[in-house]
Image: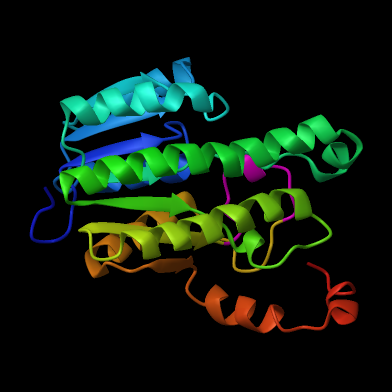
């Protein structure tokens, strides 16, 4: 269960090597979180992340998980919830892809969509059902401002995040009143390994800043969190820019 400050005692991360997710885990473990499951493809990076959380005092374990293998999700995630009470699930997996390459390779574009959207639909529904059966818990979904309006420079990634965002909002509405809290997090450009080498966008942020915003959102039981907060106003304006004008914007 969460403590008086809204800090979960147990945390499941889907996408266990995500820099944002690990920054969030470190922040929560420094408070009161004591059990952490890092779910992801087996790798040295996943084990190193678990070791670091153990050094901080957490009972951290790794769980094999593949976003693209939806048929395995029920067994993998179901087994976790059958044996444990989990206060918070952070759905943090996703890939950026390469827009130019993916436009020429439809199968690569499909992989982006399947990872970011259909994999999240499968895992999200399974976790939501399990949290509802518990009668409590939070499902935090890492979306992106890229999903607010498709841009020429990354519309494949952006469209997958748009689908994820709409799904998470609908899921939150479906779970309203059940004791399960769904929070959608919309970061802007995050300085991370995933964005290394890309031109930095205005109002860029960091994994640590997103983690802080997630913690604050949990405490407030927010439904939507923008990082940085000013992006909410910017994107509200951009949504209403006429398409002929929007095409000429350097976004």
The residue at 28%/48% (across/down) is 27
In terms of image quadrants, where is residue 33?
top left
Main SS category, magenta section: loop
Front residue of this view, candidates 100 and 169? 169
Q: Residue at x 87, y 81 (%)?
A: 245
Residue 107 in the image, given as x and y percentages of width and height: 80, 30
Between 218 and 27, the residue placed more toward the observer is: 218
Indicate the quadrant where residue 203 lies.
bottom right
Task: Tell me, yes or no, whether the highlighted magenta stretch contains residue 142.
Answer: no
Residue at 34% from the left image edge and 47% from the top image edge: 24
Q: Please indicate, yes or no, whether residue 51 appears anywhere in the rendered image.
A: no
User: Does residue 149 lie above or below 115 as drawn?
Assistant: below
Above or below residue 34? Residue 237 is below
Span of residues in magenta: 188-199
**228 on left or right of 97:** left
For image coordinates 17% across by 59% down, the residue present is 6
233 in relation to 122, above or below? below
Rendered location of residue 136, percent (x, y): 18, 51
User: Is the C terminus in the top left, top right, bottom left or bottom right quadrant?
Assistant: bottom right
Coordinates of residue 5 in the picture (x, y in percent): 13, 61
Query: Residue 105: where, in percent of width, then height?
Result: 87, 33
* Camera sees residue 149: yes
Q: Is residue 195 magenta?
A: yes
């Amino acid at each position: 269960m969460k403590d008086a400050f809204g800090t979960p005692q147990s945390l499941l991360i889907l996408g266990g090597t995500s820099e944002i997710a690990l920054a969030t885990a470190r922040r929560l473990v420094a408070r009161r979180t004591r059990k952490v499951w890092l779910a992801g493809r087996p790798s040295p990076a996943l084990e190193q992340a678990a070791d670091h959380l153990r050094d901080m005092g957490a009972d951290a374990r790794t769980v094999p998980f593949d976003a693209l293998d939806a048929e395995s999700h029920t067994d993998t995630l179901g087994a976790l919830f059958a044996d444990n009470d989990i206060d918070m699930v952070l759905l943090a997996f996703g890939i950026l892809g390469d827009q130019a390459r993916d436009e020429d390779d439809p199968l690569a574009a499909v992989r982006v969509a399947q990872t970011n959207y259909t994999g999240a639909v499968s895992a999200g529904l399974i976790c939501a059902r399990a949290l509802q059966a518990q009668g409590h818990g939070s499902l935090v979904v890492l979306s992106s401002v890229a999903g607010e309006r498709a841009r020429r420079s990354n519309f494949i990634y952006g469209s997958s995040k748009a689908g994820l965002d709409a799904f998470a909002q609908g899921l939150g509405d479906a779970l309203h009143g059940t004791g399960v809290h769904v929070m959608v997090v919309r970061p802007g450009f995050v300085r991370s390994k995933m964005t290394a080498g890309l031109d930095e966008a205005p109002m860029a942020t960091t994994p640590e800043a997103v983690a802080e915003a997630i913690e604050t959102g949990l405490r407030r039981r927010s439904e939507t969190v923008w990082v940085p907060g000013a992006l909410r106003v910017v994107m509200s304006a951009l949504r209403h820019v006429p398409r002929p004008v929007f095409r000429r914007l350097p976004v």
